Image (spheres, helix red, strand yellow):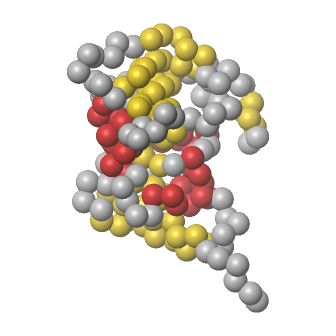
Amino acid sequence: MKTQGMKVHLQTVAEVGVPVALEITPPNVNDIEFGKKIELESGVTYAFDKGYYDYGWWFKISQSQSFFVTRFKTNARPKVTHKLQVPSTATDIIEDAQVQLTRKYNNSGHNPYYGKPLRRITVKKEGSRNHLVLVTNDFERCAEDIANVYNNAGKSNCFSNGLNRT
């Protein structure tokens, strides 16, 4: 059997970079399969990349009394329901808004976040004309703190196939 590659899925505690879960899979295994195996903890913020894009899993994170932050896919097209105030001191935050997903169904069936509030935070990307468009279920923290959670998780050397918790 010839190996064409592998993926390393790593869950770390972002503040200290300590790994708490690791799995090596063939390259064709979807990243979300690793995420769905993780025992979710209450009060934790999970930061992850678009490989873990699954509305059902996000909803389970919310149901476990935890938060998530990731990037919106460009085809998500959420509807802005309320613009949130961005303090003048938050120079990297372009927009902060409450949004709702407009698709009742997705590839995996019913979308549990259809019609429910999410938060979209648009952040300036250093050295780029493009922006980082984040989505979270966290309405408690300020937009800058949420952006920092995502950016700090991205500093993990395995973030492309990683899941970080704070």
**Residue 54 found in image quarter:** top right
**Residue 64 found in image quarter:** top left
- Coordinates of residue 10 in the picture (x, y in percent): 45, 65
- Nearer-the-camera pick, 34 or 151: 151
- Coordinates of residue 20 in the picture (x, y in percent): 37, 65
Residue drawn at x 35%, y 67% is 19
The reply, left or right, for residue 66 in relation to residue 82 is left
- Coordinates of residue 113 in the picture (x, y in percent): 60, 28
Q: Looking at the picture, does residue 150 appear above or below residue 142?
A: below
- Res. 114 visible in picture: no
The reply, left or right, for residue 36 in relation to residue 92 is right
- Res. 98 visible in picture: yes
- Nearer-the-camera pick, 165 or 110: 165
**Residue 34 found in image quarter:** bottom right
Q: Looking at the picture, does residue 151 appear above or below residue 12?
A: above
The reply, left or right, for residue 54 in relation to residue 119 is right
